[in-house]
Image (tube, rainbow, N blue to C red):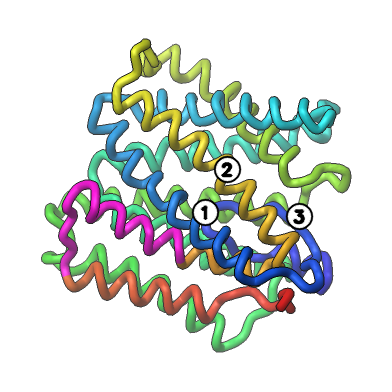
Amino acid sequence: MTDRDEHSTAQAARTIAIAVPAAGANRAWAWMLLLASGIVWGVTFSLAKVATAGGAHPLGIALWQGIFGGALLLAFAALRRRRLPLDRQHLEFYLICGLLGTAVPSTLFFYAAGHLSAGVMSITLGTVPLLTFLLALPFALDRASWLRLSGLLLGMAAIVMIVAPESSLPTPDASFWVVVGVGAASCYALENTFIALRRPADSDAFTVLCGMLSAAAVLLAPLVFATGTFTSLAWPWTEVEWAVFGMAVINVLGYGTFIYLVTYAGPVFASQEAYVVTLAGVAWGMLLFGEVHSPWVWGALVAMIAGFALIKPHGVDAR
C-alpha cells in the first residue's frame, strides 16, 4: 500500500493515522476493541443533546472540547516524554486543522444537536467517510470505481431520504439542521484531505490531534468570551457538565483506540468502526431518549451503511 493510499482511509470521525497492519493480529481482540470503541463513541450524539438541552451554548461546548481534549493529550505526550513541535510549519498546520477539524464543525454539530434526534445526527455525521472519498479523488489520494461511486450516491440518497419527505422529520425546520450537520461532516472531510496533503512528516497522529485541539481552543476562546457564550462548569457537576466532559474524554479515547486498531489490524479493518458508531448513535438515542424514527430515516440508515460497505478503502488487513 502506498503512502497516498494509506492517507485516504475513510473513517468514522477523523482520519490522520497512517500505519502498516501487524502480521498475525488477534482478530478476536481487534473485534472486541472495535465494537466497544464504536458503541461508546456512538453515545456522544446523545451526550450532545443532553448538554444543549441543559442550556450549554454550542460555542461554549466546542471550547471545552478543545480545552479538555488538548489537556488530556498534552498529559499523554508528557508521559511519553514527547514534545509538541511548535515551529511555524507545525503551528500553521495546527491552526488550519483546529479550524476545520474542531472549531467550525463542533460548533455546527452542537447547534444541530439542539434540533435533531441523536439518531439523525449520527447518520448525518456518518457522511464523513463518503465526503472524504469524494474530496480525495481530485488530489489522486484515492481511486475511483463504479462500485465506490455507487457507495457515494447511496450516502447522498440517505441524506435526501431524511430531508425531502415531509414525514421524515418531526418538523419542517429540522431539515435545515440536517444540512448544518452535513456541513459539519464536510468540514471534517476537508480536514482529512488537508492532513493527507500537508501533514508534517515528523508528526504522528497523537501529535496532530493534540495540536489541533489546542489550536481550536485558542481560536474559539476570544469568540466565546466576546459573545458571552462561555459555559461555566461549576462544581458540583450536573448532567450537563458531565456530558461536556464525557464527550471530550470519549472522543480522545475513541480516537486513540482507532489509531491502535489501524496499527494492530490494518486501516481497512479499522474503517469498519464507521458502521458501529453510526448504528450505536441511533441505538443510544432510542435507549436514552425513546426516539422513534420514521421509515424514511430507517431507509436512510440502511442506505448509509450500504454506502460504507461499497466505499470501504482498499488494503490488506491482518488475519
Q: Nearer the viewer, mark 3 or mark 2?
A: 2
Q: Is residue 283 magenta?
A: yes
Q: Nearer the viewer, residue 284 or 192?
A: 284
Mark 3 is on which residue type? Leu
x, y percent for residue 96: 66, 38
Helix, strand or loop at disc 3?
helix
Residue most extreme to the bottom: 146
Q: Are marks 1 and 2 in contact (CB under 8 Å)?
A: yes
x, y percent for residue 206: 72, 41
- Residue at the spot 38% in from the left edge and 27% down from the top edge: 242
Who comes first in sequence, dot 3 or dot 2? 3
Q: Which residue is mark 2?
A: 253
Q: Is residue 238 visible?
A: yes
The disc placed on residue 197 is: 3
The boundaries of the magenta stretch are: 276-294
- Rounded to the nearest whole Å, what is the CA distance between mark 3 and mark 2? 25 Å
